[in-house]
Every structure is written in C-alpha cells, then in structure tokens.
Amino acid sequence: MADIAKPSYYVTTPIYYVNAAPHLGTAYCTILCDVQARFRRAMGFDTMLLTGLDEHGEKVADAAAEHDMTPQQWCDSLVPAFTDLWKTLEISNDDFIRTTEDRQTRAVQRLWEVLRDRGYVYKGTYDGWYCVPEETHFTETQVRHADEERHTEGQHLCPDCGRPLERVQEESWFFKLSAFQDQLLELYSAHPEFVEPEIRRNEVVSFVEGGLKDLSISRTSFDWGVPLPFDERHVTYVWFDALINYIAAVGYGDDSAAARSELSRRWPAQAHVVGKDIIRFHCVIWPAMLMAAGLPIPERVFVHGFLMVKNSQTGAGEKMSKSRGNAIAPQDVIDMLGVEGYRYYFMTDVAHGQDSSISFDRMEQVYNTDLANSWGNLVSRTVSMSAKYFDGRSPQLPAGWGERPSPLRDIARGLVERYAERMSEFDYAGGIGQVMELVHAANRYIEDSEPWALAKDPAKADELAFVIGGLLEAIRVSAHLLAPVMPETSAETLRRLSLGDEADSCDLSAVCSWGRMPGGVALAKGPALFPRLDVAR
Ligand code: ME8
C-alpha cells in the first residue's frame, strides 16, 4: 500500500540492448541510478528505480538467426547476464522491464492510436540510410558530410559509430517531429533543469534550433517489433518502442484502476539518467512524443559522460565499448575491489557529467586511501578501543553529551543538508566528500586525543568516554550517509554497533542527528571491512 504522504521519486536507467553483454559503462549508469534511488529512499521519498532491456529491432533479429534461435529465445538466453550482474552489484531496482513483455506492446500500441487520433503520424516512404548497430536513421546530407570527413572513398559509414550503413527505401509511418520545434525550445528555456549538465543542454538546444525533420517510426523489412495496431505489416521503430518503456512500466496503456492510479502516482518521472550518446532520443524525440500524446514531460534528463580507457597502441583515451573490444569486464573490477569498493570508486572518482578516464592504478589508490586507510581503519580502531576500554561495549555517556562541543560535532552539524544538496544533484563526489571529511576528522581526533593515554589515567575516565562515544557517533552517522554507495558495508558497520535496525531508516536527518549513539551496547570487532590492496604489477 503506497504511503500517499511521501512524494514519489521515479528514476530510470536506459534500457540496454540485450545483444551486448553488460560492461563497465552500462553498469556505471545503473549504479549511478541505484545510488540516487537509495539516497531518495533514505530521505523518505516513495522511490521507484526502473531498469530493463531493449529487445526488439533488426540487430537482435539478425543475431538470433545467426544463432539458429527465434528472436524471443535469443533474448531470453541473454537476460540472466544482466539480472545476475545487477544482483551482484546490489542494484535495488523495483521493476525490470523487457520490451518483449505484453505491458510494453499494450503501451506502444496505445500510443500509436493516440498519436494517430491526434494527427501526429502519417504514412509515407523512407528513403535514406540506416545504421543497424546504432538503430538510427541518417539523411543523405549527414552521410555525405561524414564520408567527406572520413575520406571513405565510396563506402558509406555511420556518422556516429563509423560502421557500414544500410540503404533503406521502404514504406514507413512518420512522426511529425518537425511540429515540435517551438514547444521544445520553450521547454528548454522554461525548464533548464530538463537537460543537465548545461553543456548537454546547449548541444540539444542548438540541434533543435537547426530544424527538425519528421521521423520514420516503422519498418516493414523485418517483423521483430511491436506491430502497428492499425497497419500490421509495419513494426514499430526500435527507438520509438524503447522510449515508451518508461511509461509502460508505470501503467500506461492499461485501463485498470490500479494501473491508472500507478500512472498518476509515478508520471512524470523525476529523472531519466542516460549517457551522452542518446541525448537526442531522450531530450528531443521523447518529450515531443509526450507532447504529441498530451502527457506530462519528465522533470529532468541527467546526462552522464563516457568511461574512457587508454588505447594500448596510440595511448589516447577512447570510449569503452563492447564493439571496440576495449571493454573491461565488471567481474575483473569486482575481483580486485569487491562490490562495494567498485561502487565507491565509480561513484566518487568519476565526475558524472563529463568523460572520465579510468585505470586499475587509480582504483587501487582510491580504495586504499579512502576505504582501507580511512573508513575501514576508523571503524576497526574505534570498535577495538571501545571494546578494550569499556568491556566490549560502547561507553555510557551523560544525557545531553551530544551538545558538548567537539571537532566531530562541529563537522556533523548541517552535514546531512550539505550532503543531500549535492547527492540530489548527482554530485556524489561532493556528497560523499562531505562524509569523508568527518571520517578524516575522526581519524585525526584519535591521534590528537590519544585515547590510549587517557585510558591510563583514572581521572580522565569521563574524557575517554566522551572521545570514544564521539568516535562511535561519527561512525554511526557516516555509515548512514555512505549507505547509498556502499549499502552492505554500512549495514555491517551498524550491526557491529548493535544498531542493525537503524539501517532501514527513511529519515536521514533524524537518524543522523548528533548524539544518538546509545551507551552500553555490545560491539563486534569483525574482520577488516576493506583489507588493504597490494596489487603486484
Ligand atoms: O542505447 N561509459 O542501449 P545501450 C559510460 N537501448 N556509459 C556507457 C558507456 C561508456 N563507455 N557505454 C555505454 C541503448 N554506456 C538503447 C537505450 S533507452 C530508451 C534505449 C551506457 O545498451 C550509457 O548510459 O547501447 C549509454 O547511454 C547506455 O549505456 C547505452 O546503452
């Protein structure tokens, strides 16, 4: 039963092509969304995280034929590679949509009918170029310019990915995208937050200012797609189909009372998170489709950059992708850093709005500095000291101890607000950076206050209790704030403080208010949360 008092926060990943096994890039975007969803749940939002798979189109039909399978069998065989990895990476998706599901067919067909009734689709002939791997149409002019730039001598290559294009001449239904130029420009100016960061918004605005052409949105040369409800020889263009997943998952096209209420509760989405390769689809075509259907527009499209790796021959940075053969398998990183170290590295060391070079050396450095030496070390030192000096327990402190000034309390004041401001803008390096200041300050506080010396002097027993109590409190607060990025380690840390029940709190401000660490609770030392890495290379 939904708690109607809580505002909805609906966040989506792209639905990935089922054909290419997930790699660090797709995992990166999925974790980015997972952290936002976990953060929003902790802030009390009625949160929904959606991910899924894009299973239609010529590319999938061709691959299935090569493997002597039906397209459906082929898709079914590929799904576990995604769902298993998402489970391993602690992705807390509330739903998983596949475009081959009935709910998707129903939603796509409903949208076709609505667009036809409202006069936004018409039948014509498509005569142009098509890139099957990218599932994208290109005009004669776009292809000519790309060919000139690349000096391809008679061979026509995709302006985006450089692979050979297919010439397509077929009857097609078109979407009147050209009718939405002004409305789209109005949207970007009235709601600049609709496309973020700004560099991507500028790109989208100048693209739309350059003029929009109607879009071919059906194919007849193969049948692996959603058939048009009023022209069965045609199947829906795979991108038109795929975008509709975002409303299909929340009840669009289903007339039951439950589905209608879900749609009004969840739509419009608060955030679509996508890579910069697919902004035209999400920031131009998708809002135009929604405008044409009379549906509300999502609040924002957050566009992240690419993970880049060094080309081993040229030394230059290039986009990591399956097709370039330079993709690092997520398992290789998991083997090295563990799942939580993996999540921490990608979420805090990669600037999410820009392209970022990644390397194993840097992963090791971030892991050792922040997790092994700072966070993990703080937990193990503090719990050990408390257990040693207070008989396996947390110290008893007088009521109101949290009001007494200390360097830790000073940092913890207003910390949730500073953290939340950054996290809600997808600035995880900034948000987690705030928490790490508390962690670093706590490690310094140990050095400065020297609990081992206080413990030797019975007259300083109260002071020792205050210092250790403050350190445990800093750990408790930090564990809550680090949880969206490293959920299991935070839950384990709270369990070690006998506070396992707190892990499910959905009121971050209340649970992080300074001074709540109870006295006299049993503490468990446990193995190192992040054993130091020493990777011989
Ligand atoms: O485009 N760095 O699916 P897709 C960071 N099915 N992110 C990367 C990346 C990299 N090197 N490579 C890929 C599709 N990604 C469509 C989407 S949505 C209605 C349909 C991520 O499997 C990034 O988020 O090619 C990119 O936008 C997405 O994977 C593309 O996934």
Image: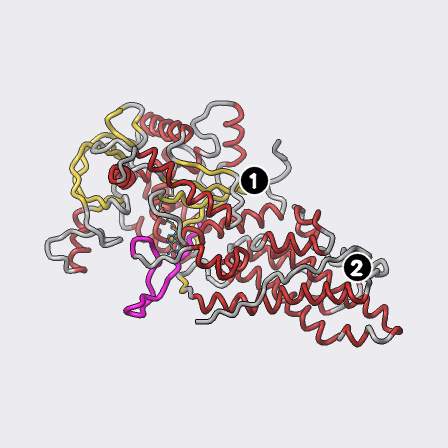
Q: How many marks can you see?
A: 2
Q: Earlier in the sequence, mark 2 or mark 1?
A: 1
- Look at label 1 and name its amino acid: Ser
Residue 143, percent from left and from top: 18, 51
In reply to whether residue 305 is colored magenta, the answer given is yes
Q: State the scheme by which the image is colored.
A: secondary structure
Q: Residues within 10 Å of mark 2 (few under 14, many from 20)?
A: many
Q: Which mark is residue 393?
A: 2
Chain part drawn in magenta: 302-324
Q: Which mark is residue 8?
A: 1
Classify 52 as above or below 344: above
Q: Is 416 situated left or right of 81 in this image? A: right
- Given the current orientation, which residue lies at the most extreme right position? 459
State the CA–CA distance, disc 2 to disc 1.
40 Å
Q: Between residues 196 and 35, which one lies in front from this camera angle? A: 35
Residue 331, percent from left and from top: 45, 55
